[in-house]
Amino acid sequence: MARLVLSLVAVVLAGACYGPEIRDCAIQCAANSACPDGLTCVASMCRSEGETMPCGVEGERCGVGGCEMTETIHETPESCPADCGSTMPHCGGFRLMSDEFDGVSDALWSPVAAGPGTVTEIGGRLVLAPGAGGAAGYLSGLFHDLREGRVEIEIDRMVETNTDAIAQLLLGSADGGVLAISQQRGELLLGYADPLITIPYDPVAHQHWRIRANDGFVFWETSPDGRDWTIHASNKAPYDLSRMRLYPFTISTEEAGTFEIAKLVGGDGMAGYCPASEMDFQFATLPSVVDVAENGGECMVIPSNDQLLLRASQASTCYGNFGTAYDLRGGGSVVFEIAESTTNGRIDVGHRVSLLYDTRNYLTLYHVGDYLGSDLVVDNVSSPKILPVYTALPQAWRISEQPGQLVIEVSINGAPFTRVDTRAWSTDKAARMYASVLTTAGNSSPTPPGDFRIASIKGY
């Protein structure tokens, strides 16, 4: 069951089905059966070219105090810094996800629950209660960078270990990979969707869980006190660690109590998000950090002719959220190059681009019917405004930060940008903004809603 749960979560975290690099010894195969590209079926396992060490034999792992032997790891770094700390800090790291669970943060988390499962924060603890036949967890709203970083949790209460309940700390990559530490039926599983190693679970020795990346390798560790750590597994990172989502999670088919986390600590990396100038989304393919969703009728959010095409059917809403945040402070800006925005004159058809701090605070620029408008939402309070008439294409829509405000500008056919609106905006919220695009249509007319095409989204 643990393997199945991890596989399903991997798809949820990725937002789509991608083909990550498959590591040596990760997949079983029948004689003469096909393995993924670059692997060959040898002795019932898909093996990397040139790999000769048998799967599962002893090899070295390295940690504080030098190297020792482990039963399952055979691909490890030659050494680990004495403090196992950062050697190359990256912006947008997991230190930005640290949480003491003293109040739900819409900027960090999206609660995920199924069946009777519940997600609450009580008394400085994240309480995940799956119930019988349910699931409960938190999913980080954005991707963060695990390179030269770490994520650790302190466990205050574990689900009952004599049940089939699974408690997990998962990191899912944009390219479909999963890093995990899980407890099920008194065993601790550490590794990927398939564990690298399984050991008896000790609630005292394993009160703290940590997944850490250093110099291209991943380490799975536990600690009784959050200070002295034991490395149980390590391996060369088979996935892109620069875009990872965090998912503390529990699932059960029977009543099994709760999985309670006292705090989450993200470490290493730079203190803030990457500057807006590093944002650059082109659409020959769909960027892996884009979450696509729909509500109502059929939707289309796909790359088409090097553009992002959004097409809604009647009575539907289609959107794509770009799951990486950027820092606009200091005059940063984001330009949405609009290749097509057709409403066929319908006032119940809208095409929108947004920059969000979270789902309660954002700025939207939209084309509805035959006019252009903006909407500032602060703490879920909306302030829409009609702007000058929407005229010709191609257009570029630019949102720029200035001290205490966001400025909206429009350029037509490559002409200089013209300011059309200014909205008050907190400098603190400008430090963490991500893009979203949307098209929506009502059901008031048989006339097709019209397409929304975006050529690029780029920061400066």
Image (spheres, rainbow, N blue to C red):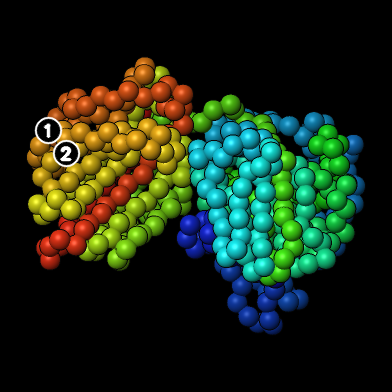
x then y, percent, for residue 29: 68, 77
- Write down the residue under mark 2: 372
Q: Is residue 212 visible?
A: no
Compared across the picture, whether 415 is left or right of 45 comes to left
Between residues 115 and 91, which one lies in front from this camera angle? 115
Check the picture and name the quadrant holding the C terminus: top left
Q: Is residue 432 above or below residue 30?
A: above
Number of other residues with Cα within 10 Å of mark 2, as a class: few under 14, some 14 to 19, many 20 or more: many
Residue at 46% over, 31% down: 432
Residue at 12% over, 62% down: 445
Instruction: Find numbered disc 2 in the image and state the secondary structure of the residue it sits on.
Output: strand
Place residue 338 in its image quadrant. top left
Number of other residues with Cα within 10 Å of mark 1, as a class: few under 14, some 14 to 19, many 20 or more: few
- Write down the residue under mark 1: 388
Place residue 275 in its image quadrant. top left
Residue at 29% over, 42% down: 353
Question: Residue 242 got which mark?
Answer: none
x then y, percent, for residue 312: 25, 60
Place residue 210 in its image quadrant. top right
From mark 2 to mark 1, how far is it between C-alphas?
6 Å
x then y, percent, for residue 347: 14, 50
Compared across the picture, whether 438 is left or right of 90 comes to left
Q: Are marks 2 and 1 in contact (CB under 8 Å)?
A: yes
Check the picture and name the quadrant holding the N terminus: bottom right
x then y, percent, for residue 72: 82, 59
Residue at 10% over, 37% down: 389
Identify residue type, mark 1. Answer: Pro
Q: Is residue 398 above or below residue 437?
A: above
Instruction: Find numbered disc 1 in the image and state the secondary structure of the residue it sits on.
Output: strand
